[in-house]
Amino acid sequence: MEITEVRVILKDSSDKKLKAYATVTFDNVFVVRDIKVIEGASGLFIAMPSRKVKHACPKCAFKNELRSKYCNQCAAPLPVEAGMQQLETAAIQAEHKDIAHPITQSFRESLQRKVLETYAREKDKVSVVKS
């Protein structure tokens, strides 16, 4: 699989950890949006697009975000013990689940390298324009 295009949109806020969003096209036929470029303790890395973990209301089965006290659909109180079980599970699995992600470490490294190279070029363009 070939990465055929990488687009990066820089974020204005310089004091935040989120530095940019990337859109990556594969083989000119498949797009993944909202890949985040994040400043971590040991440098820049990418985070794949994700969604929040949700749990169902026992009354109406509406899926509510983790830690909700009341159902957003029927306003019924959500059981605390169900929320606690979800929190324990979430502590293990994290509060977010990836929507799309690389399967192999080598492809992840390749994807990260290309996104971070494009990020660096975009950042340089902006700093040249500001100078």
Image (spheres, helix red, strand yellow):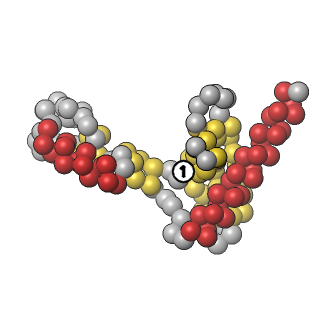
- Residue tagged 1: 47
Total numbered labels placed on residues in the image: 1
Tell me which residue sits at (61%, 47%) in the image: 42
Residue 72 image offset from top left, x and y in percent: 24, 33
Tell me which residue sits at (77%, 39%) in the image: 123
The quadrant of the rendering that contains the N terminus is bottom right
Q: Is residue 61 visible to us here?
A: no
Q: Is residue 83 left or right of residue 11?
A: left
Residue 19 image offset from top left, x and y in percent: 63, 38
Tell me which residue sits at (36%, 50%) in the image: 94
Quadrant for residue 15, please give it: top right
Q: Amino acid at mark 1?
A: Ala
Residue 41 image offset from top left, x and y in percent: 58, 43
Q: Is residue 61 left or right of residue 111?
A: left
Residue 44 image offset from top left, x and y in percent: 64, 47
Q: Secondary structure at mark 1?
A: strand
Q: Is residue 96 left or right of residue 35?
A: left
Residue 58 versus residue 36: which sits nearer the camera? 36
Residue 25 versus residue 42: which sits nearer the camera? 42
Up the image or down, 21 lies above or below 113; here it is: above
Q: Is residue 6 left or right of residue 57?
A: right
The quadrant of the rendering that contains the C terminus is top right
